[in-house]
Image (cartoon, rainbow, N blue to C red):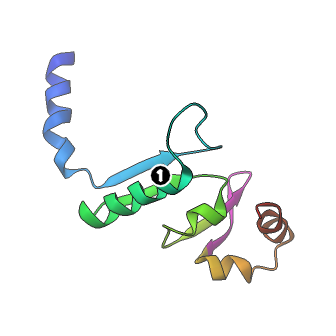
Amino acid sequence: MERKSAWAWRARWPSIRTFFCVTSRPPAGIPITAREIGELIVSLKEKRKMTAVVVTHDIHGAKSFSDLLIVMRDGKVLVEGTFADLQKSEGSYVVQFLKDSG
């Protein structure tokens, strides 16, 4: 049964158009920079026409490759939009988050 499902997964793989990436801090011990990760995401978006869903604390890094940014807290969306939209937010958590993240 497992072997059959593995083949089914491989058959579906070319049709998958979403790429997920979860980062918390720069990857320790891995010889890749945050900029290179961003370039890889842009490449996947452009060349493979994939949607990238990235979860990160690096909002300033994410703005370089994101069409839409979402700030969440305790499972709730506080603000979503472009980086300029986030900068216009009047929510105290969002303002402090942007300030703290450089």
Mark 1 lies on residue: 37
Q: Residue 72 location, x and y as percent?
A: 68, 59
Q: Residue at x 68, y 52 (%)?
A: 75
Q: Nearer the viewer, residue 56 or 64?
A: 64
Q: Which residue is drawn at 53% across and 69% down?
A: 64
Q: Is residue 13 above or below residue 88?
A: above
Q: Residue 71 location, x and y as percent?
A: 67, 63
Main secondary-structure element of the magenta-colored stretch = strand
| Residue type pointed to by label 1 | Ile
Q: Is residue 40 above or below residue 99?
A: above
Tell me the magenta residue range.
Answer: 71-80
Q: How many marks?
A: 1
Specify the quadrant that holds the N terminus. top left
Looking at this rendering, what residue extends furthest in the front direction?
31
Membership of 66 in magenta stretch: no
Is 84 displayed left or right of 92 in the figure? left
The image quarter containing residue 95 is bottom right
The image quarter containing residue 41 is bottom left
The image quarter containing residue 51 is bottom left
Q: Is residue 16 above or below residue 51?
A: above
Membership of 73 in magenta stretch: yes
Other residues around mark 1 within 10 Å, as few (<14) / some (14–19) / many (≥20): some
Specify the quadrant that holds the C terminus. bottom right
Is 94 displayed left or right of 47 in the figure? right
User: What element does badge 1 sit on?
Assistant: helix
Q: Residue 45 location, x and y as percent?
A: 34, 63
Q: Residue at x 81, y 79 (%)?
A: 90
